[in-house]
Image (cartoon, helix red, strand yellow):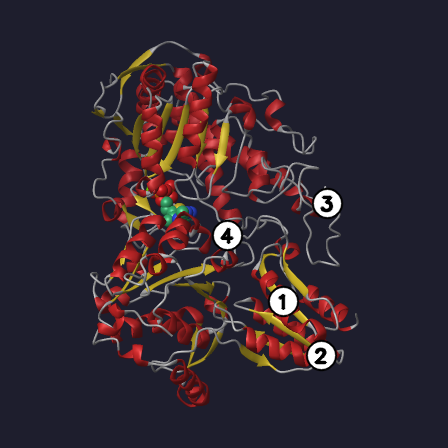
Amino acid sequence: MALSRLSSSAPGSNLLKPLTSAPSLRRSFSAAADDSTPITIETSLPFTSHVCDVPSRTVETSPKELMKFFRDMALMRRMEIAADSLYKSKLIRGFCHLYDGQEAVAIGMEAAITKKDCIITAYRDHCTFLGRGGTLLQVFSELMGRQGGCSKGKGGSMHFYKKDSGFYGGHGIVGAQVPLGCGLAFAQKYSKDETVTFALYGDGAANQGQLFEALNISALWDLPAILVCENNHYGMGTAEWRAAKSPAYYKRGDYVPGLKVDGMDVFAVKQACKFAKEHALKNGPIILEMDTYRYHGHSMSDPGSTYRTRDEISGVRQERDPIERIRKLIFAHDIATEKELKDIEKEMRKEVDEAIAQAKESPMPDPSELFTNVYVKGYGVESYGPDRKEVRAVLP
Amino acid sequence: MGRSSVMSRSRLMNWASHTRRSRSHQYQQAFSTSSETGKSLNLYSAINQALHIALETDPRTYVFGEDVGFGGVFRCTTGLADRFGKKRVFNTPLCEQGIVGFGIGLAAMGNRAVAEIQFADYIFPAFDQIVNEAAKFRYRSGNQFNCGGLTIRAPYGAVGHGGHYHSQSPEAFFCHAPGIKVVIPRSPRQAKGLLLSCIRDPNPVVFFEPKWLYRLSVEEVPEHDFMLPLSEAEVIREGNDITLVGWGAQLSVMEQACLDAEKDGISCELIDLRTLIPWDKDTVEASVKKTGRLLISHEAPVTGGFGAEIAASIVESCFLRLEAPVSRVCGLDTPFPLVFEPFYMPTKNKILDAIKTTVNY
Ligand SMILES: Cc1ncc(C[n+]2csc(CCOP(=O)(O)OP(=O)(O)O)c2C)c(N)n1
Ligand SMILES: [Mg+2]
């Protein structure tokens, strides 16, 4: 239950206490949330493969899972929209990249794996962190550079981490996280605990030399590495076809098998990730190209409308939106009413607002934090600055 | 200044006949005529003008980088693709090592390759190409080959809230690689004149642009084609009590400190180094011999920063004239922080404080 720990404690309670340990106060609003009766559905599209079998399109789900997917994705969507307004009101500084539109990738992936598996991604990391069990309070505190953040306020939007559930974060240099993911996978293989690493990167990043280095070493050493290309079709303002001779990213591994997956369908993502994990444990690396879409611009300084048409964006929203897909399935199987789903969305909104209010109460890091974590305490050379006033540089 | 055979062969490169003296002359001219013919421009527009001129005056000039065809994230390349065509101004994939390597090859064939790295923070994937290929191509081939036509432009430095990967000042890394030049302008007019010199200089150059000033800094910039000399520092403010040396965006901060120090009766001489390697020791030395005191300020972390090199050289040559230890007011020895940027930065007050300490030593 990736997001079950998200429910916030009452406002005014111990603000800095990570909410991960708070018991869930939310009660299921309807019986559906606990109903595990199997429902059989088909993924939106068949999978396309490169030098490997294809997983079945037929998947089994339940009212419980459908409701959970709906709730979790609605929460992510709301969180990102709230981050947008916080940024515009200058409460978030630095660079901020939003994930709305791509939620099904984070949710589907989590549904197929465990927290012993590792995930490593780039800077568009808020929702991946939430999926790994991070809390809204940690998200908003980190975004606003507060002590209560998942990186103690020192990382900001691009640098979310969660060690206890294998989330290796949050990397700012395009492509850099992928070879790191191979290192994680090597260590996992060595420890023989049947776990794998999902290394996520974008369609733009796919053109970095490091990607090809990572592919080769992961195949050479049969690493349990799953290279997930989140293809949202743009790298900043550059459409995929302008930057890639072959935008079929799932085939880019040549000798590494690949699958093309509808990244807007959470069930397709889940199915592909399950398949990939099994494959990777037996045979080594595999690429999953997730065909997805970001609704927002690249970052907050990009309106996102100069290099693509408004029709394109609204077309995706209407035809392929990952949340709407689940909403329709819920209606089709008579699991909840329109009003009930609207109520969930309202509830998510409230949770987000409460988390923001709490995060605002979280203090800024202590100025001495400027100097900590450069080296291990006691192992570094003395780090000093020219300052004679603002910071007494007595260093930890 | 040595000129490669590739370049002197080209009929088109009339610029190549400029001697250092004639360039100085143009620079003087630029200054004396600027107020009459100049138009008010901000820094990114001045860069844009320089690129227009570079492409216009030499058909073997190319401009490329990530999203450059659309104008680039800072709008520096706006209009270039429309004007000069997509064969000369083009987007590259997201691959810095490839961008610079490609630029070296293009330049080796006698072209002017102007590569943009979107942020100086992203120059590191290309570090190997710059340090091992660009810097040493001429030397190790016994002057058969070179990539003198290569200029790498990259926005550097703090912007107030850029965080770890949109704020760094990596100039010192490149100052440790003989064979390339490192140039940093402080204002629109300087940016235009220096960039044109860099593009036309027969050596590979890394040109760092102060992104904080892209829109902020506005001054009169001559519209015509002019160049400012490389490896010539400029005394931008004369004084007797202490010499301050800096480059890029830091100069405006230092200038403020000089004005405040003046109120306390301290007369500061402020020098813009402009080219970091090969740097103009003579100008700095002459100034320190006059004032007896030196302060260097840069945004990059203090340890191993280029300030250290200046300090060591000046102590060697002006030891007996120094009346106080050389002072460095720089970034702290930490990664560039997201929060507490003002603590990290060599702010005006820190500089002012150091000026007083040095003068009262
Ligand atoms: C080495 C490097 N070069 C350039 C950048 C600037 N940059 C940040 S994100 C980005 C586009 C990446 O696109 P993609 O990989 O498709 O990921 P998306 O943003 O679409 O999730 C660029 C060029 C960077 N962060 N690192
Ligand atoms: Mg992309």
Q: In front of the other: label 1 or label 4?
A: 1
SS at badge 1? strand
Residue ID for mark 2: B241
Does residue A298 show up? no
Question: Which chain contains the residue that carries disc 3?
Answer: A
Q: In front of the other: label 4 or label 3?
A: 3
Numbered circle sitting on residue A292 = none
Quadrant of residue B1 within the rendered picture: bottom left
Instruction: Check disc 2: other Cα within 10 Å, few if <14, some if 14-19, many if 20+.
Output: some
SS at badge 2? loop
Q: In front of the other: label 2 or label 4?
A: 2
Q: In the rendered view, would you say A346 is above or below B276?
A: above
Residue at point 58% right, 60% down? Answer: B299
Horizontal placement of B352 versus B55: left or right?
A: right
Q: Where does residue A196 sit, x and y in percent of width and height?
A: 41, 21
Instruction: Check disc 4: other Cα within 10 Å, few if <14, some if 14-19, many if 20+.
Output: few
Gap between marks 2 and 3 measured at Cα: 34 Å
Assess whether mark 3 and mark 2 are in contact (beta carbons under 8 angstroms): no
Instruction: Check disc 1: other Cα within 10 Å, few if <14, some if 14-19, many if 20+.
Output: many
Gap between marks 1 and 3 measured at Cα: 24 Å
Gap between marks 2 and 4 measured at Cα: 46 Å
Residue at point 50% right, 31% down? Answer: A168
Residue ID for mark 1: B296
Quadrant of residue B223 within the rendered picture: bottom left
Residue ID for mark 4: A88
What amino acid is labelled 3 in the image? Answer: Leu
Assess whether mark 1 and mark 2 are in contact (beta carbons under 8 angstroms): no
